[in-house]
Amino acid sequence: MTPPNPPETMSAWETVGAPARIRQVTRSVPSPGPGEVLVAVEACGVCRTDLHVTEGDLPEHRPHVVPGHEVVGTVTRQGPDASRFAVGDRVGIAWLRSTCGACRWCRSGRENLCPTARFTGWDHDGGYAGYTTVPEAYAYRIPAELSPEQAAPLLCAGIIGYRALRRAALPPGGRLGLYGFGASAHLTAQLAVAQGAEVHVLTRGEQAQRLALELGAASAGPAAGMPPVPLDASILFAPAGELVPVALAGLEQGGTLALAGIHVSDIPRLDYQAHLFRERTVTTVTANTRRDGEEFLTLAARLRVRSSVNAYPFESADRALDDLAHGRFAGVAVLSRAATAR
C-alpha cells in the first residue's frame, strides 16, 4: 500500500543536554536530497549511544539534533536520482549515515574508520521523530518476517554486537564472555549460542542474569566476578573501564577482549603479567561497515535472533532514555507507533 503524502510538520525530540537530555518540539518534515529517501518512522530503538549523545559523553556535532539511529520505517518520497527503493518499501536506518568512499579506509573495506564519516542521530537528525531522511546507499532492506519493533534494535545493538563478535576472534565452539547484558549483548548471545559457542554472562542485576540464562547462556554471574572457566574471547559491552582488567583476568592465554562501546570510562592501570602476558589481546570496535549490517541482518533472520523488547510510545522517549540510564529493564527499549502510554 502506498503511504500517504507526508504532512508539513511533525513532532520530534531534540537534544538539550543533561539533566533534561531531550525535549519535544514541532519541526518541518524534511525533504530528501539527491540520492536520499524520506522515511516515515514506525519504530526506533533507544540505544545507549543516544544517552552518550544526549548527556554530553560524546562531543556535540550538531546542536539540538534529533537522536535515534535504529530506525525502521516506510519510504514515502524519493529525492532526485534515488531509485534503489520504491515508495512503500520498508527500510532500516543505522548509525553509519555516509562516508567519503575515496580515502584509504573506504577503499580497503574499512569504511567504519573513514575520517569524514557521518552518523545518524549525531551529525544528522535521526529517528526520534515522525520522519527522517537517509542516503539510500546507507539504508537496509528489512526482512519481511521481522516486525518494526523486532527489527529496530538489530540496526545498531545487533550490528555492533556482530562486529564485536568478529573482532573478538572467538574460535569455533569456543567459550565467550559477555560483560554487561543490555541491548547488544542479549542479541550477540543468541547469535553466538546458535553458532555453537559456550556463552558466559557477567552482569549486574538479577533480571539481566535471568534473561541471559533463558537465552541459552551456560552461566550468568556478577559483572566483577570471575567466569567459571577460562574464556577464549570476551566482549565488554558495559561502558565501565574498571571492568577491563577484570575481563582480561578471566581470559585464557591467547584470548581476545573486544571493547564494544563508543564511550568507556577511565581504565585502571593494567599489570602486564596478570592481564596481558601470554598473548592476550585487547581490541576495540568502531561503528560498522554496511557489509556488517547486511551480513548480520541475514544471519539474524536465518538463526531467529529476537529482541527482548520493551515498547514505549514516541511521546515517552524521555522516559525510555531515563529507564535505560537507570537500568530499569532487561533487553531493549523501542519507541513504537503501535505502543500505548503506560
Image (tube, rainbow, N blue to C red):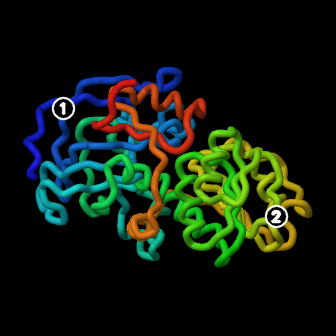
Residue flagged by tag 1: what amino acid is it? Ser
Residue 11 lies in quadrant: top left
Residue at (32, 49) in percent of width and height: 148
Q: Residues within 10 Å of mark 1 (few under 14, many from 20)?
A: few
- In depth, the one of 121 and 336 nearer the eye is 336
* Local secondary structure at mark 2: loop
Residue indicated by mark 2: 229
- In depth, the one of 70 and 56 nearer the eye is 70
Picture layout, residue 297 above or below residue 69: below
Picture layout, residue 169 above or below residue 225: below
* Local secondary structure at mark 1: strand
Residue at far front of view: 214
Residue 89 lies in quadrant: bottom left
- In depth, the one of 328 and 166 nearer the eye is 328
| Sequence-wise first label, 2 or 1 | 1
Residue at (37, 53) in percent of width and height: 151
Q: Residues within 10 Å of mark 2 (few under 14, many from 20)?
A: few
Residue flagged by tag 2: what amino acid is it? Val
Residue indicated by mark 1: 28
Q: Is residue 190 visible?
A: yes
